[in-house]
Structure formats: structure tokens, C-alpha cells
Image (spheres, rainbow, N blue to C red):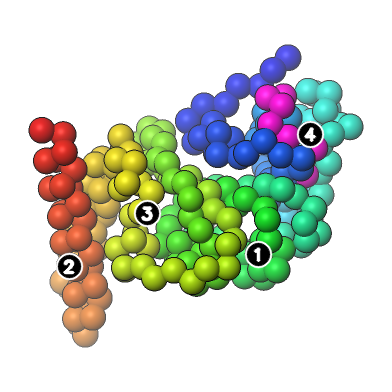
């Protein structure tokens, strides 16, 4: 019996390189470790979560797919459940970007090595990219996935110790997405402009908001410029 993944989870799995051990932080149902083992992408997996409920669900699924000998569940917060250099690839997905970076910061020494990070923040992607750049990571791949009316971004990064300069807009739209002309990038930018318009509408009713207004107006302008470039590329 094999497990099938679609959409966001499938894209996350696709970004995991063939390796010895993968760690899925915040595993929930352990679908990613199960799939990766079945596909022969890794030999062993660690499925960890901070809550007992998801760990128990993961245990049941691992038992169901008869993978108890190669997938180990652990309970704990973030990266505290693994040792440094224990995993060749580390997945952190399905949580807010601010929380995700807090987990990285709490155990930075565990990710500043050879492991590939596969990250899928639900929001605040700029916060995640900024953390990675400031800690000398190379974001070597990004790709978008659509589910319903939402578009998710999956990024792959590895520590290389090189200090990289970046422009502010690169924190909001990853350089890889622009270089590869991701098929969903135009829709993603249009979605972000709609979100910014809603924020601008709220800010207009507030006092002493000149700084925020300027920030969002500048960000909107950058998105519109990219939309124009992408439209030209299609014609």
C-alpha cells in the first residue's frame, strides 16, 4: 500500500534530495516521512511534533504503512528533537513564517551545517528569507503550488557561510521564482497586490501611519512592476 501526495505536500516532498535521514519538524500525520521512505528518497526518517496528539496520529499512520523500523516519532519543540548532523534534510512546513524562524533561531547550530532545509511557511515569507540571508544560507530553489484559492511557496536552502547582499523586494519574491519564471508567479503577485490594497484601505483610516503607508505603497509598486514584466514575457 503506497501513499500518494498532491499539491503543497507533493511539492515539499519533491524538494527533498535523496539522503540517508530526513527529519520532518511539525510532522502532524507523518505523511511526508512515509511518502519519502516509500519513494526511496531516504533510508530513515524522524517525525517530530510538539503535541502528543499529532505524534499519536503519526504513530498510527507509520504502523498502518508498516514502516515502524525506519520512521521514528519524537515529541518536542522544533529542532530540539534532533541532534546536530543527525539529519541530511530537515523539513519545516505548514506553520507561520515568524514561528518557523523562531525555531531556526533557537537551534541555529543544528541547521548551519550540511543539511538541506526544505521550508514551507504559511505566511511572512519575507521574514524567513531575511533570516536565511542574515545567517549566510543559499536559497537555491523555490517553487509555488496552488491549492484552492491559495498559493504556497516551498523553498530549499543550505548553509554556505557566504554573506550575500539583497534588495528588499527579494525578501518578498524569491530570486529563484523570478529567474525560473514560475508559472504561478503572476497569479501570486496579483494575489499579493490585492492583499496590500486591503491593508492600504485599513491604514487610510488610521492616524500616524505615514511610515506604514509608504512601506506598503512602495511594496505595491514593486509588485506592479514585476507583474508588468511578467505580462510582457507572456506576449
Q: Position of residue 54 (x, y in %)?
A: 72, 43
The structure residue drawn at horizontal position 19% and vertical position 81%, both measured from the top left corner, is: 210
The structure residue drawn at horizontal position 36% and vertical position 68%, both measured from the top left corner, is: 166
Name the chief secondary structure element in magenta. Answer: strand
Q: Element under label 1? A: loop
**Of callouts 1 and 2, which one flags the residue occurring earlier in the amino acid sequence?**
1
The local crowd at label 4, few if under 14, some if 14 to 19, many if 20 or more residues have their Cα within 10 Å, is some
| Magenta stretch, residue numbers | 38-48
**Of callouts 1 and 4, which one flags the residue occurring earlier in the amino acid sequence?**
4
Q: Position of residue 233 (x, y in %)?
A: 16, 38
Position of residue 37 in the picture relative to residue 189 (left or right): right
CB within 8 Å, label 4 to label 2: no
The local crowd at label 3, few if under 14, some if 14 to 19, many if 20 or more residues have their Cα within 10 Å, is many
Q: Position of residue 97 (x, y in %)?
A: 50, 59
Q: CA distance from mark 2 to mark 3?
A: 19 Å
Question: Which label sits on residue 174?
Answer: 3
**Of callouts 4 and 2, which one flags the residue occurring earlier in the amino acid sequence?**
4
**Of callouts 2 and 3, which one flags the residue occurring earlier in the amino acid sequence?**
3
Identify the image quadrant of the N terminus. top right
Q: What residue would you read off at disc 4?
A: 43
Q: Position of residue 212 (x, y in %)?
A: 25, 75
Q: What residue would you read off at disc 1?
A: 112
Question: Which label sits on residue 217?
Answer: 2
Mark 4 vs mark 2: give the one in front. Answer: 4
Q: CA distance from mark 1 to mark 2?
A: 36 Å
Amino acid at each position: 500500500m503506497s501513499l500518494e501526495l498532491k499539491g503543497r505536500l507533493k511539492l515539499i516532498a519533491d524538494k527533498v534530495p535523496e539522503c540517508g535521514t530526513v527529519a520532518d519538524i511539525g510532522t502532524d500525520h507523518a505523511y511526508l516521512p512515509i511518502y519519502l521512505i516509500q519513494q526511496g528518497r531516504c533510508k530513515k526518517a524522524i517525525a517530530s511534533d510538539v503535541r502528543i496528539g499529532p505524534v499519536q496520529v503519526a504513530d498510527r499512520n507509520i504502523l498502518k504503512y508498516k514502516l515502524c523500523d525506519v520512521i521514528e516519532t519524537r515529541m518536542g519543540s522544533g529542532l530540539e528533537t534532533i541532534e546536530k548532523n543527525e539529519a541530511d534534510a530537515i523539513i519545516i512546513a505548514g506553520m507561520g513564517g515568524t514561528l518557523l524562524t523562531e525555531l531556526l533561531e533557537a537551534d541555529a547550530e543544528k541547521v548551519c551545517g550540511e543539511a538541506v532545509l526544505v521550508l514551507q511557511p504559511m505566511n511572512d515569507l519575507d521574514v524567513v528569507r531575511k533570516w536565511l540571508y542574515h545567517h549566510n544560507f543559499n536559497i537555491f530553489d523555490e517553487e509555488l503550488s496552488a491549492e484552492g484559492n491559495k498559493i504556497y511557496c516551498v523553498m530549499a536552502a543550505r548553509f554556505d557561510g557566504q554573506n550575500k547582499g539583497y534588495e528588499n523586494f527579494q525578501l518578498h519574491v524569491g530570486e529563484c521564482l523570478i529567474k525560473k519564471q514560475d508559472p504561478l508567479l503572476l497569479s501570486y503577485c496579483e494575489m499579493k497586490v490585492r492583499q496590500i490594497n486591503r491593508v492600504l484601505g485599513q491604514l487610510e483610516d488610521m492616524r500616524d501611519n505615514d511610515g506604514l503607508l509608504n512601506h506598503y505603497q512602495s511594496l505595491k509598486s514593486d509588485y506592479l512592476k514585476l507583474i508588468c514584466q511578467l505580462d510582457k514575457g507572456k506576449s
